[in-house]
Image (spheres, rainbow, N blue to C red):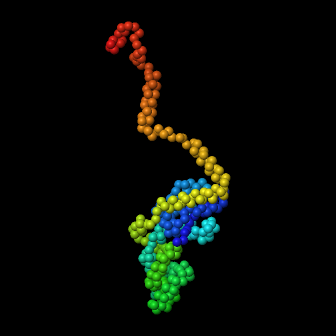
Amino acid sequence: MERYVLCLREKNKEGKEEIYPIYEDTLKNIDMYTTYKLCFNSKGLFNCFPDKVKYFINNHLIKGNVFDKKYEFFIRKKSKDIRRGRTDLEVLYFSDSDIVYANEKDIYSALCEMKVNDKDYNNDDPITVLKKDFFSNIYKILFSKESKLSDRIDKNNENNFNNHSRIRSVATNPSNLKIIAEYVCYDYELKREFLILLKSYKKKMDDFFNKKTRLVNKDILEKRIGKRPFSIYNANEIINRMLNEEEEYYYSKYPDEHKIEVSNKLVKKENVKKKNPLEDNPDYLKYLAHLKEKENFEESSDTYEDDNYDDFLGPDKPNDPRYWSIN
């Protein structure tokens, strides 16, 4: 199974563009990470990273105000030098989690909503024009690249005595739509590319009817996400490990920044007050309270000015009547 890398493209403090490879995994696992329920956008994704990763990005790869920052994330197929890659895939966020978890049945249902009635195929109303445009783009993604799929569609058309063009036969024939739904599910990258296109056109159509676009029912989607075979913890372990490698690369390229980083850490370490190991001991705390109470008492004793107060040091003369009660 091919490996992909979630990357960040940013400029460092010197204004030089840098690419930071953050998370390597299968494309589907990366999508399950970026469509996590807290990742509504690039800033939400950034906030899901381990603290060490956020610190590294904000201190070395961000130019400008980090609070207003929109991070430029993308996905790239793994290669010997990820920084020299050219083909970038867009990152999916939570609102597109239905793309990740849609199955063959969901895809077929969505395709049927885009189907064109054969008798209306030559109409020029906005909905029909939109649907035909969608199927024209399907041709570019599927039939120009996937010869096996083209053969299956052509064979199906022959069996059903369908003499329409391939595009029209797909746009109007549910059996061809079923073949497509089944075919794209064999390859996640193809399915992903196809569903991004399908959802974008379905949204345009749903907008005509003020309808929210979903490829998967909301309740079903939540259940699938809950049962996903994926661990955020394991993903963050990979991300932390890749950070160590990236720090070596970055600091070898910018040694001055490494010196500053080391210097800042030493200053912080010196400024951190060392904790007394007795501070968590309850007996020690009681002892401190006792010392404080004694100190307060002694201070109040030194300033006591009541004329009737007698600091007894013994009688001034034998049989002093002031101290008869003592005897």
> Is residue 233 positioned above or below 259 on the image?
below
Q: Is residue 31 above or below residue 269?
A: below
Q: Quadrant of residue 57?
A: bottom right
**Residue 267, horizontal then vertical, whole percent:** 60, 45
Instruction: In the rendered view, tell whether residue 309 sits above or below residue 51.
Output: above
Name the residue at 52% across, 73% down.
189
- Nearer the observer, 212 or 100: 100
Residue in view at x 53 percent, y 41 percent: 274
Residue visible at 45% across and 30% down in the picture = 291
| Front-lying residue, 151 or 180 | 151
Q: Position of residue 16 (x, y in %)?
A: 66, 60
Q: Position of residue 266 (x, y in %)?
A: 60, 46
141 or 70: nearer the viewer: 141
Image quarter (top left, top right, bottom left or bottom right) of the C terminus: top left
Q: Residue 143, how many percent across, how many down?
A: 54, 82
Please identify the residue farthest to the top as the structure is shown: 318
Residue in view at x 56 percent, y 54 percent: 55
Visible residue check, residue 201: no
